């Protein structure tokens, strides 16, 4: 299985970029992982919230293959402990999924078509985080999930 993380907009903070790159490198020991950044939409001032979500949704759909399993990072999604999330990843691998795609939407969330396409929603917390920080948290939690599955000492139970 391959895991892809799709995100709208680049990460400006060099420290966050370095940390994300570190966890991407670590993940390479366990699974094929790709971080795919969708550029910010230009001239958003001329768009309504709904129009911006629609345009972002179109860009997200272009990045998907028909067999991809899309999971949204959404404030109303299911919350997991790290151990439960590792079990979730194991079940996805056992299901024979070719590519699992997590997506972090834009500032207003997702369009209706993206919600309809998604096979699930996950929430990292009830708190609000910057989209740039969420990328780091997701990559770190995927890494943590694989260390848990391998009974490695990164995660202490």
Image: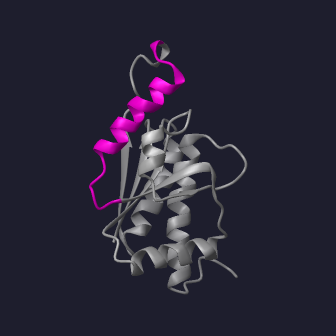
Q: In this view, does 131 lie to the left or right of 24?
A: right
Q: Where is residue 71 shown, x and y percent of the image?
A: 47, 57
Q: Of all residues shown, which one is farthest toward the top?
A: 46
Was residue 58 drawn as part of the magenta stretch in this picture? yes
Coloration of the structure image: one colour
Specify the quadrant that holds the N terminus: bottom left
Residue at horizontal 45%, vertical 24%? 51
Q: In this view, does 5 lie to the left or right of 127?
A: left
Q: Is residue 142 left or right of residue 69?
A: right
Residue at horizontal 37%, vertical 33%? 39
Relative depth, front residue between 142 and 18: 142
Was residue 55 drawn as part of the magenta stretch in this picture? yes
Q: In this view, does 39 lie to the left or right of 120?
A: left
Residue 31: quadrant of the picture: bottom left
Residue 65: quadrant of the picture: bottom left
Residue at horizontal 48%, vertical 35%? 12
Q: Where is residue 41 shown, x and y percent of the image?
A: 40, 26
Task: Identify the magenta region.
Answer: 46-68
Q: Is residue 49 above or below residue 139?
A: above
Relative depth, front residue between 62 and 149: 62
Q: In this view, does 54 lie above or below 7?
A: above
Q: In this view, does 34 lie above or below 8?
A: below
Q: Where is residue 96 shown, x and y percent of the image?
A: 34, 77
Q: Is the magenta stretch mostly helix, strand or loop?
A: helix
Q: Is residue 4 above or below residue 94?
A: above
Specify the quadrant that holds the C terminus: bottom right
């Amino acid at each position: 299985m391959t895991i892809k993380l799709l995100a709208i907009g680049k990460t400006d903070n060099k420290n966050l970029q370095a940390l994300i790159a570190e966890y991407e490198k670590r993940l390479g020991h366990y699974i094929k992982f790709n971080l795919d950044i969708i550029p910010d939409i230009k001239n958003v001032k001329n768009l309504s919230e709904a129009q911006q979500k629609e345009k972002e949704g179109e860009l997200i759909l272009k990045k998907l293959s028909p067999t991809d399993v899309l999971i949204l990072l959404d404030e109303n999604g299911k919350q997991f402990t790290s151990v439960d999330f590792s079990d979730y990843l194991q079940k996805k691998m056992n299901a024979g999924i070719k590519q699992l795609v997590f997506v972090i939407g834009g500032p207003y969330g997702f369009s209706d078509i993206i919600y309809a396409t998604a096979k699930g929603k996950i929430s990292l917390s009830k708190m609000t985080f910057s989209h740039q920080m969420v990328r780091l948290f997701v990559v770190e939690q995927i890494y943590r999930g694989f260390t848990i599955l391998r009974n490695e000492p990164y995660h202490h139970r």
